[in-house]
Amino acid sequence: MDLFSNFDNIEATAERIAELSKLIDQYNYEYYMNDRSLVSDQEFDSLLRELQDLERSNPELASPNSPTRRVGGEINKSFKQVTHRFPMLSLGNTYSIEEIVDFEARTRKLLGDTQFSYTCELKYDGVAIGLTYKHGQLVQAVTRGNGAVGDDITANARTIQTIPLKLRGSYPDDFEARGEVVYPFNEFETFNKQREADGEEPFANPRNAASGSLKLQDSAECAKRKLQFCMYFMMLPSNWKTIGDSNELNLDTHFDRLEAARQMGFKVQPYIKECRDINEIREFIDYWDTERWNLPFAIDGIVIKVNQVALWDTLGLTSKSPRWAIAYKFKAQQVSTPLESISFQVGRTGIITPVANMKPVWLGGTTVRRATLVNADNIQKLDIHDDDWLLVEKGGEIIPKIVGVDLSKRKVGSMPVTYITNCPECGARLVRAEGEAGHYCPNQDGCPPQIIGRLEHFVSRKAMNIESLGTERLEMLYSKGLVRDIADLYSLDKEQLIGLESTDELGQRRASIQEKGAENILMAIEKSKSVPFERVLFALGIRYVGEVGAKKLARYFKNIDSLVSASVEELASVEDVGEKTAQFIFDFFHEPRHLELIDRLRKAGLQLIALETQQSNILDGKIFVVSGVFSNFSREEIKTHIEQHGGKVSGSISGKTNYVVAGEKMGPEKLKKAEKLGVAIISEEQYLSMVNG
Ligand code: IVH
């Protein structure tokens, strides 16, 4: 290939990349900002794939703001801490309308004869972030953090479709767009349902889910979360200039700034109003107090700002927040409704959850019929009597909460509700362990919802991932006596499966397994035999051992046999494993039936040994604790490094600890303890020379 044709080639490739990026950007913009689809999904995917291929073979031509970045793929080992160029202040806030009246009167007084107005807008209930744009390109996204320093989450922010990567039209050469990342209700619900199906703890509310998503290490995972950015503020340095199309930008008022941001490609919610006086402000607040439940995302109040930017300096700041803005927070909505009955649910681990069945009542955008009463202690604390009217509340959360009893409606002579003594499913006498607030059914092997629950957890995606076995099929296998425990799954054969039928509550036939279906089930079961040890450990469903705990236990003990013979003390020394969990794990592995179960799983060929990634055994038998920030490793990396060289990592310092590897900013408590116990404290460099001989 001669030089010239190569040059031509690169030129042509760069041109095609620019052309594809522009097209895809435009399609994305229309789709996410204007709800308009200009091409078929197929055509869109094929353009995106072409761009991905070109960028992969010409990485020097790939821009950090290419639309291919929307799908993620960058891994953030740990988030870089960034000092905000302009501190991210919070707002003074109040639940009282009188204080809003005071704020308005005070502002009017301070501004004297000056003509001004207010803007009223929604207070989004999500996670605050700041986006820095230079020359029309997104260069950095940082969380609010403590207002002065936040986490650099740029890779994850790029996956949010409503964050423009490149700006349109005219824009300031340098500025920060601030706003809130929210998790729309419908997406949140789908996501939480999936989490539950996977045996994971659902998020309590969209805000927590948004925050967790922004902190994901894998940006491709973040891309799947369908977050939204709602811009609410434009922060300009004093010497900004207009660039881009260079049409004049009018940024004198907050209202103008948000309108200009919309033209640049930001998603700016239309629910903003310029208000002249307190009556208009009140009207806006009252309207949204009820109307908020019809929004597709959560808000927790209204923000009122002085509209004219030039007046912000005149009004100034208090120690924490500007004097030119205030937030009115909505109170949680509350209704009272009669309690009709209490039902008791039995969970996978035998835990009993009492649920209040109430006369359906309209609250915050949905009809509420049922709500958890948590446990017996809670019922007692709320002092619920038969036939009481319950006070139900809904704040920013989706899940209604029972907060008390409407005593004005209590019937004379009514008695406190009685708690069940026996399991509603199997009749076994319930147990309440000392110090525990809840009851549980101890009949693990004879109580159907516990058995089915354990099977569901075992086959779930994050555990053994046996997709073809859903709840209905597991129930069917259980009721036919084919599967009584998780090990039974591994002795199923095709003949047993073919023709199995499930019936609905009325005894009507619903579905039967055909030959192909049976083959698929057996294939998925076979495949699960190669699932790594840490996931098998999670799949066992030991109380309080989640995905992360299982990973840490697997890394520490390396195989099931050392785990089985570990003492409570040794178990508790593993990071993230508390005393209580350690005791549960110990008890689990000291039940003969569990040992027998493990034996059967071993015979079936499951992975009960962690994969060998050992690089040396130079640290054999040595127990380490790591603390602080390291320069060559993230905290997780140094732990893996220690283990790969034969050492063990413990979460807390004890007499058994051999070394504490101290990074920068080591915790003072750890330092004190290490000194007291005479444990050697070594630096990262000393650690490295120890490993490298
Ligand atoms: S303005 C200097 N506007 O509420 C003014 N904040 O304490 C900066 N928030 O965490 C804030 N919606 O992230 C503003 N429309 C809105 C908002 C909003 C939500 C959050 C903000 C901050 C808190 C205020």
Image (cartoon, rainbow, N blue to C red):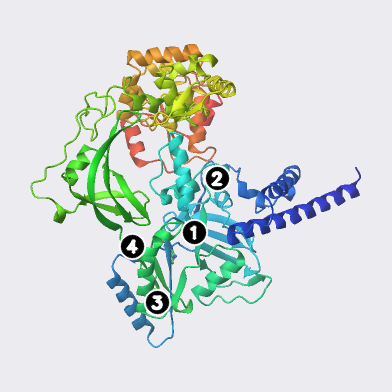
Q: Mark 3 against mark 2, which lies toward the viewer?
A: 2
Gap between marks 1 and 2 measured at Cα:
28 Å
Q: Mark 1 against mark 2, which lies toward the viewer?
A: 2
Q: Residue at x 61, y 46 (%)?
A: 71
Please, what secondary structure does the residue beneath circle 2 have?
loop
- Locate residue 33, reporting x and y percent: 59, 61
Q: Earlier in the sequence, mark 3 or mark 1?
A: 1
Q: Residue at x 57, y 63 (%)?
A: 266
- Locate residue 326, reporting x and y percent: 37, 69
As drawn, the label of residue 224 is 2
Q: Which residue is mark 1?
A: 84
Mark 3 Cα-neighbour bin, 10 Å: few <14, some 14–19, many ≥20: some
Is residue 54 shown left or right of residue 176? right
Q: Is residue 645 above or below residue 492?
A: below
Q: Residue at x 41, y 55 (%)?
A: 146
Assign the N terminus to one quadrant of the image: top right
- Residue placed most toward the observer, 666 or 170: 170
- Locate residue 389, reporting x and y percent: 20, 51
Mark 2 Cα-neighbour bin, 10 Å: few <14, some 14–19, many ≥20: some
Q: Which residue is mark 3?
A: 315
Gap between marks 3 and 2 measured at Cα:
43 Å
Please, what secondary structure does the residue beneath circle 3 have?
helix
Mark 4 Cα-neighbour bin, 10 Å: few <14, some 14–19, many ≥20: many
Q: Earlier in the sequence, mark 3 or mark 2?
A: 2
- Please say if the residues under marks 3 and 2 sit with CB atoms less than 8 Å apart: no
- Residue placed most toward the observer, 124 or 660: 124
Q: Which residue is mark 4?
A: 330
- Please say if the residues under marks 4 and 3 sit with CB atoms less than 8 Å apart: no
Is residue 142 shown left or right of residue 408? right
